[in-house]
Image: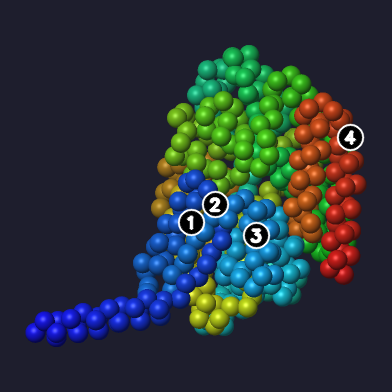
Amino acid sequence: MKFKTLALAAAAGVLLAANAQAQTEIQWWHSMTAVNGEWVNDLAKQFNESQKSYKIVPTFKGSYDESMTAAVAAFRAGNAPDILQVFEVGTATMMASKKAVVPVSKVMTDAGYKFDSKAYISAVAGYYTAPSGEMLSFPFNSSTTIFYFNKDAFKAAGLPTDKAPSTWPEVVAAAAKLKASGHKCPFTTAWQGWTQLESFSSWHNVEFATRGNGLQGMDARLKVDSPLHLRHIENLANMAKQGLFVYKGRGNVPEASFVSGECAMINTSSGFYGNVAKNAKFAYGLAPLPYYPDVQGAPQNTVIGGASLWVMSGKKPEQYKGIASFFDFISKPEVQAASHQRTGYLPVTMAAYKLTEDSGFYAKNPGTDVAVTQMIRKVTDKSRGIRLGNYVQIRTIEDEELEQVWGGKKTPKEALDSIVKRGNEQLERFQKANKG
């Protein structure tokens, strides 16, 4: 009897081991931290629990820049991840790396899934689609730039709390009142290149770069030395001199100063919402980006940010099937809607947007629809998005030059001229390397 029991136990162990072996692991490298990192892990857990054939293994690989660099090295060494999260700044580079990636539309159709790119918000899908119409990467945490303000600070300064400043002159006036009330950081901005040059351009329907901001060809060149760009950076520089704008660092670093209550107004990603909703200890509001009311065509629409998921080449067929299954799972309207409501990232599909609207979420949480309504407007050739080669390096140049302005070491004109000169050198280098 004892022998029989042991035999059955051994057989069960073999069966369990076989099942474990049959499960295909999908390695997913991402760059999400804090509340958004928790969201990524939860998505993987939900998918893994929904079926037994595949296991998504999410791994944080550092900042967007760092994970891209790590993936390039891993690809060359033959051990790239199956899925790589790449921020929108790296899109042109990934599109040019044709041997390293497999178009997401091919992955889905090969696995037998119906893939309709028209189901996605056009401004989102269009950004990640090749001129041939083939969708190359999966829109994941797509975001755009919006305006957050601290209602408690506004109330203390005698400012209305039911409406954010909608124009730049109103932002300056509000900042002055906040400072007079004792607020040491009335306004700051995160992702300064994205918010103050790139989104600023599309929001005012002016070119950031030629050739449709790069979407029409690799021979695009920067145009951020225009009179309007100069006027805006001069405005911010004057605010900085008066203590109305306080520079808090690169990337999303300044966001902590808003959550802590130190800064009362901030321009940053809609994907910041989850952090604010969870951690801010004050009443807050979300609003569209400010604009200059005398500029014809403003406000237009903001450009896409965030990141998409790229499928790496050289994998086994069962891995591609698992990736397609995961993408199908996170495309479901109820999953998309839940992610949008939790994080502030765009719902990506119109079905998810409609589901969120019908649920009453936007009515219960005023301002959470700002990112969507800014993005679903009819776009122009100047506002469709920005897709440039060596964009990671250009973003760094933008940071370096603007910091010179905030530090009083360069005039706005000198900095913008330098961004154009140094940025165009990067564009020429990318064009030459990729024979565009």
Q: With respect to residue 208, does 233 lie above or below? A: above
Cα separation between marks 4 and 1: 42 Å
Q: Nearer the viewer, mark 4 or mark 1?
A: 1
Residue type at numbered disc 4: Lys
Q: Earlier in the sequence, mark 2 or mark 4?
A: 2
> Is residue 312 left or right of 392 when viewed as pictured?
left
> Is residue 10 left or right of 348 when viewed as pictured?
left
* Badge number at residue 40: 1
Q: Position of residue 118 (x, y in %)?
A: 60, 69
Residue type at numbered disc 3: Ala
Q: Earlier in the sequence, mark 3 or mark 2?
A: 2
Q: Residue furthest left?
A: 1
Q: Earlier in the sequence, mark 4 or mark 3?
A: 3
Q: Position of residue 46 (x, y in %)?
A: 39, 62
* Badge number at residue 32: 2
Circle 4 residue: 413
Q: Residues within 10 Å of mark 1 (few under 14, many from 20)?
A: many
* Badge number at residue 70: 3
Q: Residues within 10 Å of mark 4 (few under 14, many from 20)?
A: some
Q: What element does badge 1 sit on?
A: helix
Question: In terms of depth relative to the viewer, which is nearer, 96 or 229?
Answer: 96
Q: Nearer the viewer, mark 2 or mark 4?
A: 2
In contact (CB < 8 Å): disc 2 and disc 1: yes
Q: What element does badge 2 sit on?
A: loop
Q: Earlier in the sequence, mark 4 or mark 1?
A: 1
* Residue pictured at 58% horizontal, 36% vertical: 255
Residue type at numbered disc 2: Met
